[in-house]
Image (spheres, rainbow, N blue to C red):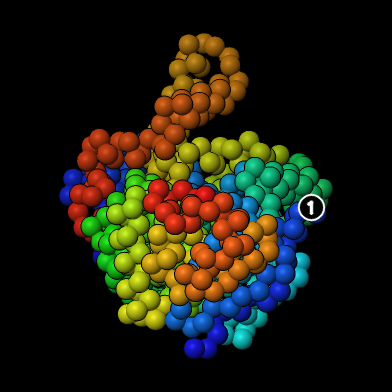
Amino acid sequence: MTTLLEVDNLSKQFRGLRAVSNVSFSVPEGAIVALIGPNGAGKTTTFNLIAGVMPPNEGEVRLAGRRLTGLRPDQVCAAGVGRTFQLVKPFGDLSVEDNVLVGALHRRPRIADARRHAVQVLELLELGPKRHQIARGLTLPERKRLEVARALATEPRILLLDEVMAGLRPTETDRLVEVLRDLNRDTGMTILLIEHVMRAVMALSSRVVVLDHGVRISEGAPAEVVADPKVIEVYLGSALESGEEGSGP
Amino acid sequence: MTTLFDQLTARGRVALGLFALALLAVPFFADGYLISVITLVLWFAYVGQAWNVMMGFAGQLSLGHSLYVGLGAYASAALFVHFGVGPWAGVWLGMLAATLAGAIIGTLGFRFAIRGVHFALLTIAFAEFTRIAFDHIGWLGGSGGFFLPVGDAAGANPFDLRGSPALFYYVILALTFGALALCRRLLHSRIGYFWLAIREDQEAAQAVGIDVFRAKLIAVMISAAMTSLGGVFYAFFYNNLFPEQIFSVGRSIELILAPVIGGIGTLFGPIFGAFILTPLAELVTWGVESAGLDMPGIKQIFYGLALVAIVVYRPEGVWPWVARHLRLVHQPGDQPSHRAGDRP
């Protein structure tokens, strides 16, 4: 498999705090890779560095060989990166359909065409029946899926999902896992996800990258990573095995 | 344009049709005073609609829209007085000047990430220093005022916008309907959706590929150009321009009252708000005067009270509330074609 996303020696400092130090990993085309680690490990910062929200102090990010570092978030999106936000950011006063329509308009300038595409994406995320509701009124699990739908509607080459399972009940988690797995299998969508819910990580990802205090401490297949003593030490053991509650260790 | 009023119910369409007919008929039954009041109402509705593009759609607060009114007014008046060029040609210079001013303010504000209240302060600052500059431009009358030759009030010369109150009435009515149609169109366009997204969450809008700087700049420029047309009308209607009046902060505030009271971000809010506010203010002034009281500034006090009442009781504006209760618009989830995003 060819490499789609390359994170190369990325570092970011906030007033002396090294949030991310010299992190490197890559995401092969068509793969699902999980980025895990305790709170404050630098996962979301890494996402923001990839998405162009802020520039890194060192290193760079490449998508299919093209340098993303230095681009604005909208340009990163145009290059083919779709992202969700950990704290969901729906366009609250717009309908569910219009939220996704805005994403679809990115590559489909005609409203009718974009709306058709938006409806398809909503069906995929099982939000079809909700599409005329105002986004503000959705439940948290629905808003999480809306977040994914909106990012997906921009027709990215890679989807960055920031804790889309957090706060979901196990049955809801399983459903979303199913949706993402189908998406990956049917369309070959590459996915990089930050996740605390190990149930989802184990079910979805082909590779796992573990961060702690901004440093990559382990990388490998899910089964290898959870057996890694360094990872177990960081997570204080048992939490990795269950992950049922969806809360982080 | 079949979608122009698609979220209105049958009842809403009938109400709107009757309202439009009544407006068209006004000069046939109303006296001069009533025509002038409704002309003023429509002027505020029109300029409010223009301001709403920036605030209501794109979420960018401008408290300096008097700048664009003034630029439109002075540009067209100067062409008319000094070069004999009529307003229909002068309009273009007015729009160009206002659009340019809007582009400068927008570029400064958005490039340096000045947001919210600070951006609003920037808009005030530009209007204020333009006012001071115009005080000192002798060619345009300076602080002493700039005057247009008063035309024949009985006749009608639409080409030079000189004529009877009815002529002015129909011009501003056409502008108001035109602005409504344009805003409706904008709201259903790609850029319209981008504006709504930016208004709701700028970071999320950027993440779905919207060039936020560009979209906001377009909003300011369209709003400024539309507003400047109101300025051209103002110049030829009143025939006198004073920098203290036309560029004043008070004027900027007055401009935004109709959409704020009617409903920010709604299409009918600015019109509805203007029809509530201006007649009420006239009524209050008339009441106070006929009671033999001398209270200059009573109108401003009334505006202040109206604003407070709106902020406390109907922060989303009067129009959405009225439309809901009179069932003039479809309720969310009523009908598959309803789009919650646009507020009628």
Asked whether the viewer can see residue A229, the reply is yes
> In the rendered image, which residue does mark 1 sit on?
A15
Asked whether the viewer can see residue B216, the reply is no
Badge count: 1
Closer to the camera in the image, A192 or A143: A192
Residue pictured at 49% horizontal, 60% vertical: A195
Q: Quadrant of residue A95?
A: bottom left
- Give the vertical position of B267 relative to A53 (above or below): above
Q: Horizontal placement of B139 versus B283: left or right?
A: right
Around disc 1, counting alpha carbons within 10 Å, would you say few (fewer than 14), some (14 to 19), or many (20 or more)?
A: few
Find residue B194 and report its horizontal and vertical position in percent. Answer: 48, 62
Find residue B144 and report its horizontal and vertical position in percent. Answer: 76, 41
Residue extending farthest to the bottom is: A2
Image quadrant in which the N terminus of chain B is located: bottom left
Q: Chain of mark 1?
A: A
Q: Secondary structure at mark 1?
A: loop
Find residue B195 and report its horizontal and vertical position in percent. Answer: 49, 59
Closer to the camera in the image, A95 or B23: A95
Find residue B138 and report its horizontal and vertical position in percent. Answer: 81, 51
Residue pictured at 32% horizontal, 73% vertical: A182
Closer to the camera in the image, B101 or A25: A25
Q: Horizontal placement of A222 versus B327: left or right?
A: right
Q: Quadrant of residue A7?
A: bottom right
